[in-house]
């Protein structure tokens, strides 16, 4: 079906920098790789590079906003680094599908980001990325980190304290400091 | 035709519900006729989210709104999304539900936002087929389809957007959710005549309106939902209400949430316009 082929090409162009580069370098090869007919290729190229890039950038920004909404305390604690790291992540990892796509995206980003941040930030990210009930051990008292982040205070100065957290819903938990 | 589907009734004004406003929403429920709820916001909220939805449904008329049903996808609908969406619609006890004339995924790639369709007969066939599938699952609850703020135009269109929407209404029996801000944005960005656009829409099609405020990004007007409704959009709303039997107006705000009183003032202004138009009819 031509519409299916056109939508497949557009979806790649909107979300994948590599696809935009392939179209720019060799439109014919791009069309062949996605079974795009001449009329559909004309439709795609008529968008223009500037508009295409502007739209792709706006999609990345929207995705970053959704991630910050899913991990509000980590976003606050990391400041501008959160968005910059997310945009780097978004270039490599496509957005998934399904009703929980933004939550899943945030969890994947948090797992990825833990390699690039300090231990307290790592603990807060791990805490915030978990949504369901469960038990977890953390190197910091994460509810205290969360309160500090909400106040806008620096969390990297916090003292480590092994903590057991029992969580029964996203917003409710009990933290027990361990000796 | 559409008025018969949705039914006659009072004109409602409200806003698109956001959790940070939960307490003020309940505290001011006599000033809010209707709440639009974004179904997606309740998908990942678990049992707490469903409890919140049930509580909202006890106190407000709810209008469920989808973001990612992707009615325009040539690949068909995502069944998992559709089932969850249907559950939210049923639980909301809604008079109608709404989605966008757009696609958000193709060949397993999730775009993450509403992407414009080519205005072709083939796209109409796809929309009609997907909508029929959605209605089989969701049940006998009227559906409204919304015009999007287009980030770009696709060449090869066989008709303009307004005629595309008119054909869609005729083909499917759906109503329209006219996003006045999106219409304003598209008219600014692509330079078309709003009056001709409205002329092309079927007389009883426009059931609900969306209002919001946007920003200029260079030479492009962006439907950011981050500002108060602009005066130009209020004027256009006045005009649309005088022309169409609008049943509900919903104010949207997603970014830079203002004090709730400002939102209430916008809801009040929307109600005054809509009810004033009814009185003049």
Image (cartoon, rainbow, N blue to C red):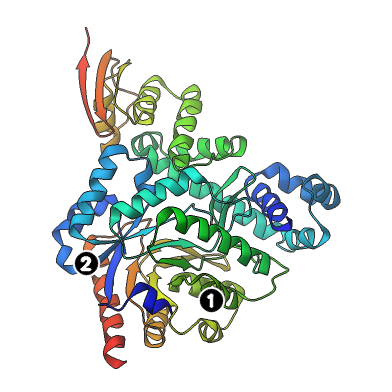
Q: Nearer the viewer, mark 1 or mark 2?
A: 1
Q: Is residue B230 visible?
A: no
Name the residue: 49% across, 50% down.
A62
Q: Quick check: A171 left or right of B186?
A: left
What numbered label is drawn on residue B32? 2
Label 1 vs label 2: CA separation? 32 Å
Q: Which residue is mark 1?
A: B170
Foreground of the two, B7 or B27: B7
| Residue A126 placement: quadrant | top left
Labels 1 and 2 share a subunit: yes
* Residue at 31 percent of width and 87 percent of height: B277
Crowdedness of circle 1 by 10 Å Cα count: few (<14), some, many (20+)?
Answer: some
Left or right: where B215 falls relative to B102: left
Q: Give me the chain letter of mark 2.
A: B
Secondary element under disc 1, as helix, strand or loop, is helix
Q: Is residue A157 above or below residue B238?
A: above
Which of disc 2 and disc 1 is earlier in sequence?
2
- The image quadrant that residue A150 belongs to is top left
Q: At x 18% / y 68%, what residue is drawn?
A: B31
Q: Which numbered circle lies on residue A127?
A: none
Badge 2 crowding class, 10 Å Cα cut-off, few under 14, some 14 to 19, many 20 or more, is: some
The quarter of the image holding the C terminus of chain B is bottom left
Residue A70, x across and y down, in percent? 38, 40
The quadrant of the picture occupied by the N terminus of chain B is bottom left
Left or right of B99? Residue A42 is: right
Residue at position x 21%, y 65% in the image = B261
């Amino acid at each position: 079906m031509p519409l299916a082929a056109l939508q497949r090409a557009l979806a790649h162009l909107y979300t994948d920098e590599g696809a935009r580069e392939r179209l720019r370098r060799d439109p014919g090869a791009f069309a062949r790789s996605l079974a795009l007919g001449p009329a559909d290729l004309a439709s795609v190229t008529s968008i223009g590079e500037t508009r295409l890039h502007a739209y792709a950038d706006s999609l990345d920004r929207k995705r970053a906003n959704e991630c910050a909404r899913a991990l509000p305390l980590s976003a606050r604690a990391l400041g501008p680094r959160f968005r910059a790291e997310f945009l780097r992540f978004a270039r490599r990892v496509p957005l998934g599908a399904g009703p929980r796509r933004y939550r899943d995206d945030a969890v994947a980003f948090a797992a990825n980001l833990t390699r690039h941040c300090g231990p307290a930030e790592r603990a807060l990210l791990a805490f915030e990325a978990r949504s369901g009930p469960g038990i977890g051990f953390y190197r910091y008292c994460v509810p205290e980190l969360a309160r500090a982040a909400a106040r806008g205070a620096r969390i990297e100065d916090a003292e480590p304290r092994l903590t057991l957290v029992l969580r029964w819903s996203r917003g409710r938990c009990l933290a027990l400091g361990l000796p | 035709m559409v008025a018969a589907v949705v039914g006659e009734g009072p004109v409602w004004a409200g806003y698109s519900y956001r959790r940070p406003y939960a307490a003020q929403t309940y505290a001011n429920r006599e000033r809010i006729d209707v709440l639009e709820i974004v179904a997606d916001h309740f998908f990942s909220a678990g049992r707490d989210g469903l409890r919140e939805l049930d509580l909202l449904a006890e106190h407000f008329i709810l209008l469920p709104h989808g973001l990612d049903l992707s009615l325009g996808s040539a690949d068909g609908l995502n069944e998992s999304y559709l089932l969850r969406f249907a559950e939210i619609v049923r639980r909301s006890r809604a008079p109608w539900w709404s989605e966008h004339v757009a696609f958000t995924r193709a060949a397993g790639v999730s775009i993450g936002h509403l992407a414009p369709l080519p205005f072709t007969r083939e796209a109409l066939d796809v929309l009609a087929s997907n909508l029929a599938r959605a209605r089989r699952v969701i049940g006998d609850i009227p559906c409204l389809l919304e015009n999007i703020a287009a980030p770009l135009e696709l060449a090869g269109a066989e008709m303009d957007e307004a005629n595309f929407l008119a054909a869609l209404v005729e083909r499917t029996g759906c109503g329209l959710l006219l996003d006045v801000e999106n219409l304003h944005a598209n008219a600014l960005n692509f330079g078309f005549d709003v009056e001709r656009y409205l002329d092309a829409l079927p007389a009883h099609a426009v059931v609900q309106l969306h209002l919001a405020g946007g920003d200029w990004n260079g030479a492009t007007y962006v439907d950011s939902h981050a500002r108060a409704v602009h005066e130009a959009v209020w004027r256009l709303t006045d005009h649309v209400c005088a022309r169409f039997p609008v049943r509900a107006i919903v104010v949207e705000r997603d970014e830079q949430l203002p004090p709730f009183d400002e939102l209430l003032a916008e809801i009040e202004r929307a109600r005054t316009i809509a009810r004033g138009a009814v009185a003049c009819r």
